[in-house]
Image (spheres, rainbow, N blue to C red):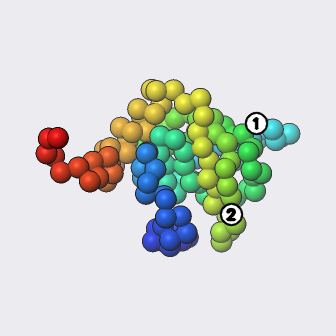
Amino acid sequence: MGSEASEQKQNPLSEQRYFPRWNVNNRVIYRSKTAPDHQFRHGHTKNISCAGACLYLKDFLSLQQKIMLNIHLSPSANIDLRATVVWQKAEDMSYLTGVAFHDTSDETQQQILEHAFEFDRSKLLDHWYKGWDGGTT
């Protein structure tokens, strides 16, 4: 699995996203909306935001493929999401897969945010208030 520093070199805009990503290792259950068998598959998150996630999956998925996800935010909370594969690359024994969420309710986005805020409050605040000195203009 790659390091966070090497990812930032490959994608220098990664920290300029409006929604920051939180590095978490959460269980994911997914299925393709177009797969003939409609079987559920398993993976886990590398990171997540309110708008998308980076996942470790065992299956190759084509770009723009629509998938249904169930992400376990904690032992007592999980969310259902619709997503589109936006990129994928082979890594070790799995595929590192970037997905963008769509048709995500405000309630679901709030759940992700609440979980992330509890997980890493300082990172969230630093991201949103970056460059702000607290003074008035």
Residue 127 % position (x, y) = 33, 51
Quick one: which residue is furthest to the left in this view? Answer: 135
Q: Residue at x 57, y 33 (%)?
A: 80
Residue 6 % position (x, y) = 50, 73
Q: Which quadrant is home to the N terminus? A: bottom right
Q: Amino acid at mark 1?
A: Lys
Residue 36's place in the image compared with 62, above or below, is above
According to the picture, the residue beneath numbered tag 2 turns out to be 89
**Res. 111 image quadrant:** top left
Circle 1 residues within 10 Å: few <14, some 14–19, many ≥20: some
Badge 1 or badge 2: first in the primary sequence: 1
- Which element type, helix, strand or loop, lies under badge 1? loop
Residue 43 visible in the displayed image: no
Q: Residue at x 75, y 56 (%)?
A: 60
Q: Which quadrant is home to the C terminus? A: top left
Residue 132 % position (x, y) = 23, 49
Circle 2 residues within 10 Å: few <14, some 14–19, many ≥20: few
Q: Amino acid at mark 2?
A: Lys
- Residue 114 as seen in the image, left or right of residue 79: left
According to the picture, the residue beneath numbered tag 1 turns out to be 33
Residue 33 visible in the displayed image: yes
